[in-house]
Image (cartoon, rainbow, N blue to C red):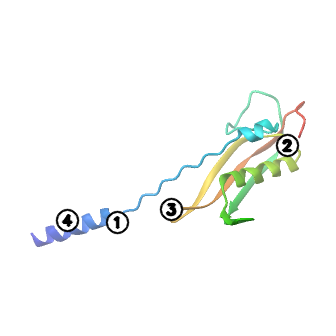
Amino acid sequence: MKKYFVCLALLLLSVSCATYNSYTVVVDYSKYAMEGFFITESNSVSFEYMPVGSVITSVTGYIKTPKGNRKVTAEDALYNFTEECKAMRANAAINVKILVETNKGAIEGYRITGMAIKVPGVPLK
């Protein structure tokens, strides 16, 4: 009977010490759409395009601002991603995947992958 209570106590202790991490990351593509840069998570689109290349962007750590350092955000990663695409003369990106990099349940940074493409007839801004 004593073993039963010890096992029960250990079980309750292990359950009460469990950690639960939850986070939500929202990334707004509309800013880039208004600038003429098309972004989709789909791996196919219904219009013709020329593939330019694969882009992988990873951001971690902190960014210096006039008000002090702040943690990087998904928006920072998306900005870097689109700038790399534009540097390749692309005006769109398809098959975009945004991954949250964590360490012990805390967000450390973001990784964005996708294919930079050129849509004919759409000027690069």
Badge 1 amino acid: Cys
Badge 2 amino acid: Ala
Whether residue 108 can be seen here: yes
Tell me, for residue 55, which label it has, or none: none
First in sequence, mark 4 or 2: give its number.
Answer: 4
Residue 38 percent location from the top left of the image: 77, 37
Residues under labels 1 and 2: Cα distance? 50 Å
Residue holding disc 2 = 90
Disc 2, SS? loop
Mark 3 or mark 4, which is nearer to you?
3
Residue holding disc 3 = 105
Q: Is residue 60 left or right of residue 35?
A: left
Residue 102 image-quadrant placement: bottom right
First in sequence, mark 3 or 4: give its number.
Answer: 4
Residue holding disc 1 = 17
Q: Quadrant of the C terminus?
A: top right
The answer to which of 2 and 19 lies nearer the viewer is: 19
First in sequence, mark 1 or 2: give its number.
Answer: 1
Q: Residue at x 82, y 29 (%)?
A: 48
Badge 4 amino acid: Leu
Residue 92 percent location from the top left of the image: 80, 39
First in sequence, mark 2 or 3: give its number.
Answer: 2
First in sequence, mark 1 or 4: give its number.
Answer: 4
User: Is residue 32 depicted above or below 70 in this figure?
Assistant: above
Whether residue 93 can be seen here: no
Residue holding disc 4 = 8
Q: Residue at x 77, y 41 (%)?
A: 32
